[in-house]
Amino acid sequence: MTTLNDALDAWVPRAMQRLAGAVPQPSFESVGRIEAVGDGIARVSGLPEARADELLLFPGGVAGLTVDLDAEIGCVLLGDSPELASGAPVHGTGAVLRVPVGNGVMGRVLDPLGNPLDGGPPVAAERREPVERPAPSIAERAAVSEPLLTGTAIIDAMFPIGRGQRELLIGDRATGKTAVAVDAILNQRGGDVWCVYAAIGQKSSTVRAVIEALRRGGAADRTLVVVAGADTPPGLQWLAPYAAVTMAEHFRDRGQHALVVIDDLTKHAAVHRQLSLLLRRPPGREAYPGDVFYLHARLLERAAKLVPGKGGGSLTALPIAETQAGNLSAYIPTNLISITDGQVTLDAKLFQEGQKPAVDVGRSVSRVGGRAQPAPLRGLAETLRLDYAQFLELEVFTRFGGMMDEKTRKAVAHGQRVRALLAQRHLAPQPLELQVAQLLALADGTLDRVPVEAVPRFRAALAALLEGRGAAQAARFATGNLGESTRAELRALAAEAARTAGLSDEPEKA
């Protein structure tokens, strides 16, 4: 029987032999210490070789990012722990922060670091990419010419959005900005566009409602939700839009198409101001630091349509911004308007009057224009915006009373039907063929013979008729230029829908 001494006698020579062959190697480790910590930031000393945006490891497994390289390094904390205290050690990593990307993140609810918030398993990522990446160069960008349909008729007809565009959704609180963005995501279901929704500083109930809407609408499996709620550390709220864009860029760089919704950049700017003041950066206008324009410019410039040599993919951005009392000339709104390729402005007064979506036609614009609009829709919507704007002016004058001539009466009656036609319920995006059929009925005068209160019934009947034609035939109405045979077929459908809705013999008098 082998005794313990016998086993040791056999083991010691082998161990001595392995030690004799080992070559000692030096190991370097950067270790500093916390000088001050609180309110989501920390000041660190003892790391003279730290670089900008370097990832630091704090006690309790908390990560931090270096943002100020002064005598004491200013760090933004990406978490919280009771072990964070003055004098505690801080370890430098020499690496930048990376987040998981790939098809495995779609359909999940994650925090900005890529950790699951939906109770599911860890993310199956293809790889990890830096949250801060350079925007594509001018030579790598192609012209924005492919449409990205939002399913909101007033936007697709008057302010078309193209793949690779940056269109700002702006308006006061509770005017339907998030609703328009969610409808745009729902409209991509079954298509080739991957969607990312980033919630910054939002209430948990608001985020939960968005997630439930995506699940009920059948778009959850192709949508990633990145959440940095109001109760999360400010560092995670600051990081959220950059992480979301990085996750969306994965598809753009592979020749695919992605849409990212950032809800919202006003809260993001407020978090940046908070962290900057705590880091003792000099304040500027409205107490924002001088780099607040660069904060969002470097983020939104990453949205682009790439040239075929780079795969031809696209990343479309729909950032959201909140105004106070409709003031578009405030600091952050003017910054974002100058960065983006247009804005859809939502008006609180229109919303309170029951006009939804409450799009202010006079203050909204798309700088890409008809180049990114489907041909059938472009041909029918050329004069729609001008006609609608003229109606709004005429309607103001008619409120003073008095006699109207026949031309004015017809213009007002026509405009009322345009407004009723463009009204739309939330979570009910309209397919392109329905929008084309509606606008053709409007242009041909069929809709002018439908009572204003019956326009919603007309739209529902027309949608049912198009759906009954089958997907292949309905899609034919939405591609290419409308020939005479196609127009005749759509006119017949519109006439049948008008009879169902309650066709009148003559246009209704205003």
Image (tube, rainbow, N blue to C red):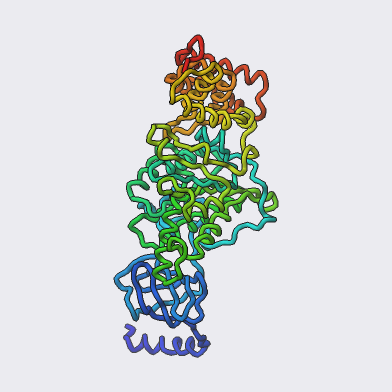
Q: Is 460 placed left or right of 251 in the picture?
A: left
Q: Residue at x 57, y 55 (%)?
A: 302
Looking at the image, is 504 positioned above or below residue 102?
above
Q: Is 52 placed left or right of 208 in the picture?
A: right
Relative depth, front residue between 25 and 225: 225
Q: Is residue 164 visible?
A: yes
Relative depth, front residue between 283 and 167: 283
Q: Residue at x 41, y 57 (%)?
A: 111
Q: Residue at x 51, y 39 (%)?
A: 188
Which quarter of the picture shows residue 229?
bottom left
**Image x and y of residue 237, in percent:** 41, 59
> Residue placed farthest to the left in the image?
82
Looking at the image, is 190 positioned above or below residue 302?
above
**Image x and y of residue 320, in percent:** 47, 48
Q: Is residue 104 visible?
A: no
**Image x and y of residue 483, in percent:** 67, 22
> Residue placed farthest to the top in the image?
505
**Image x and y of residue 475, in percent:** 58, 28
- What is the number of callouts on the image? 0
Q: Tell me the quadrant of the picture where the N terminus can be found.
A: bottom left
Relative depth, front residue between 500 and 395: 395
Which quarter of the picture shows residue 62?
bottom left
Looking at the image, is 131 positioned above or below residue 484?
below
